[in-house]
Amino acid sequence: MIKKINFLDIPLDILTMDETVNKIDKAIISNKQVHHCVINAAKVVKIQNDEILKESVINSNIINADGMSIVWSVRFLGYKIQERVAGIDLMENLISLAHKKEYCCFFLGAKEEVVKNVVSYYSVKYSEKIIAGFRDGYFDEKDEKDIIKKIKESDAEFLFVAITSPKKEIFLNKYKNELKNINLIMGVGGSFDVIAGTTRRAPKYMQDLGLEWFYRFVQEPKRMWRRYLIGNFKFVILIIKAKFFSSAK
């Protein structure tokens, strides 16, 4: 089965959750770095007019389908894909792996009280031993070198970055060569807020129906209406063009 396809000029990995976790674990065992990224409809739309974001995404080692809209679109374009690999679910699986194999994690992002709650949650759920360090996501470019130094010196195997797009993608692509001692670098968007209980995630049935976006829209309509209503429409147009008006998918 094909494991990587060209999806709107994005090299998308059509891996299952288990395959993704195993691939990352093998990289750690081999002491290699995996730069991981996920895409959803909103990010695909942004990529069309943001070359820096596009380069930051396509330079990743693994790119998973985060949203059901990506899964359905891949199938619509004639490829087989078994499931979505949502960033927050992958992060949870990898932190479980960290506990089992005695790996350490560094958490970067969100407000200070949020990231502290995330660290506290995983310390209680697993062990304080999996925590290599943490830092909030509110910083300027002048702070980045000090942050990178702190991450490098933490001896973490995993780095989870929960800041907004496209800042997190550009940040990871910019500094991944300086973070070669970190085996996994991964953007996780708003995952820290969900883990900390600051925001709520859609029920499982809504996730399976591809309505997670609608659940977020209802919670924050003023902030999300443009991203989801206009963005989703633009995404549908991109897929229709790729299906019926492109010589190559």
Image (tube, rainbow, N blue to C red):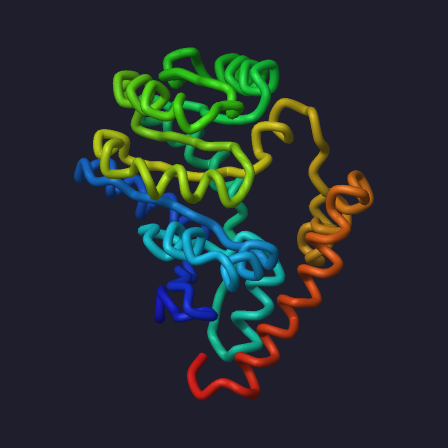
Residue at 37% x, 27% y is 98
The N terminus appears in which quarter of the rendering?
A: bottom left
- Judged left or right of residue 182, residue 200 is right
The answer to which image quadrant residue 221 occupies is: top right
Q: Is residue 231 visible?
A: yes
Residue nearer the viewer, 139 or 63 = 139
153 and 98: which is toward the camera: 153
Q: Position of residue 102 (x, y in %)?
A: 31, 22
Instruction: Identify the residue shown where x is 39% and y is 24%.
Output: 142
Identified at 53% across, 33% down, the residue is 163
Residue 129 against residue 226 in the figure, above or below? above
> Which quarter shows the C terminus?
bottom left
Residue 39: image x %, image y %?
51, 54
Residue 207 horizontal/vertical position (percent):
68, 50
Q: Residue furthest front?
A: 142
| Image quarter of residue 247 | bottom left
Residue lying farthest to the left in this orientation: 30
Residue 227: where, in percent of width, then height?
Answer: 69, 52
